Image (tube, rainbow, N blue to C red):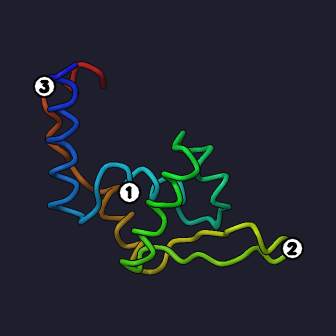
Amino acid sequence: MRDLFLGLRQLEDQLIEQVGVDLNEAILLCALGSDSRLSTEVSRLTGFLPAHTSKLLASLERRNLIKRTAGSVDRRQVVCQLTEAGLSSLETLRGLELDYPPTLQKLL
């Protein structure tokens, strides 16, 4: 378990260095893709708890990687989409050649 955690930490360090997002934020960017999605849908797609999803979305919004707006039909819903900067980060993520730690290579 320790080796797995360390491997994930090394992977996250690479993401932060090369893209400026941590592992959870990278997962969220990939889940959003080029689509507009409800925050509840993002939570379902990622498997993150709604509160954690909201925290991550707020972090990405502060850095201008996503934009959140109220739903047009139901104002309680939150619609999320990547900004130009977010799309650029997603393209960078998709083009990365990460150096997976040996512990994680076994899982791929």
Residue 103 numbered mark, or none: none
Residue, far front: 51
Read off the residue under disc 3: 102
Residue depicted at x 37% and y 64%: 91
In the picture provided, is 69 more to the left or to the right than 49?
right
Q: Residues within 10 Å of mark 3 (few under 14, many from 20)?
A: few
Going by the numbered disc 2, the residue's amino acid type is Val
Give the alpha-carbon distance from disc 3 to disc 1, as whole Å.
Answer: 23 Å
Quadrant of the rendered image containing residue 32: bottom right
Q: Residues within 10 Å of mark 2 (few under 14, many from 20)?
A: few
Give the alpha-carbon distance from disc 2 to disc 3, as whole Å.
Answer: 48 Å
Residue, far right: 73
Q: Secondary structure at mark 3?
A: helix
Quadrant of image for the C terminus: top left
Tag nearer the camera, 3 or 1 = 1
| Residue 73 pos. (x, y %) | 86, 73
Give the alpha-carbon distance from disc 2 to disc 1, as whole Å.
Answer: 28 Å
In the picture provided, is 37 more to the left or to the right than 29?
right
**Image vertical order of residue 76 relative to residue 30, above or below:** below
Q: Residues within 10 Å of mark 1 (few under 14, many from 20)?
A: some
Residue depicted at x 29% and y 21%: 107
Residue depicted at x 18% and y 40%: 9
Quadrant of image for the N terminus: top left
| Residue 64 pos. (x, y %) | 41, 80
